[in-house]
Amino acid sequence: MDTSNSNSKSAFMITRALVILLGIVALFWSGYVLGFMVFFFAFFAIIGSLGTIAIGISYNKEQLPAPRWATLLLGVLGLIIGVAAAAAPVFMSVAIIYFIGAWSLVTGIADFIFAFTRAKAGNSRLILVLSGIISVLFGLLVLFNPPILTAVLLVQVLGIYAILIGLLGVGFDMMSKTEAAEPKPAA
């Protein structure tokens, strides 16, 4: 038995279960989830940027991943963005709305590509197409109708989206297992 394939299938199912759980949390505790996302991002940006500035100052030229000025500029810009997110969380929540919309659109397009380029898609192709449709529609809704969606409503819609995508992921995994278990025709 190939344990690496078994482990990756288990990891896939665990991540899909977590997506469903996060969707439920987002659906019922939208305000907290939105606040958490904004302040988590701010904290992440500030800490990461301080580290980047420290690297830009303390590393010698050969150790730097980029020119010193670029490393320091990246650190300073990240620090400014992190502080701005903490100081103006409403502004950052609007920016997060656009990031979520763009991410969803790209994910949906990738699902379509995967559905029609995967050699052994079989019955799971339908699930990938459905996932792609949901992701693209959600992304377009968010990107082109942000005034309709308040930030809290968006988090609720994101929760529903996460639940649907998680369930489709579980279905995809189950279909993949069924297809793998089917006997292959003799050549």
Image (cartoon, grey):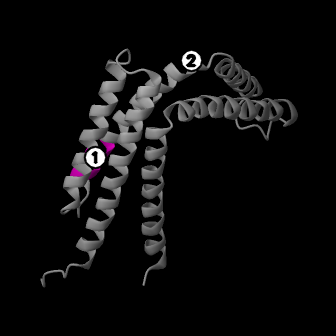
Characterize the local packing of mark 2: few (<14), some (14-19) or many (20 or more) Cα atoms within 10 angstroms: some
In the image: residue 11, left or right of residue 112:
right
State the residue lying farthest toward the front. 28
Q: Which residues are magenta?
A: 109-116
Q: Quadrant of residue 66?
A: top right
Measured from the top left, where is residue 170 in percent x and y? 34, 60
Which amino acid type is shown beneath numbered disc 2?
Val
In space, the residues marked 1 and 2 are separated at their CA atoms by 30 Å
- Please, what secondary structure does the residue beneath circle 1 have? helix
In the image: residue 29, left or right of residue 79:
left
| Residue 1 included in the magenta stretch of the image | no
Q: Quadrant of residue 2?
A: bottom left
- Please, what secondary structure does the residue beneath circle 2 have? helix
Q: Residue at x 77, y 27 (%)?
A: 68
Q: Residue at x 63, y 16 (%)?
A: 88
Which mark, residue 90? 2
Q: Vertically, is 35 above or below 111?
A: above
Which mark, residue 131? 1
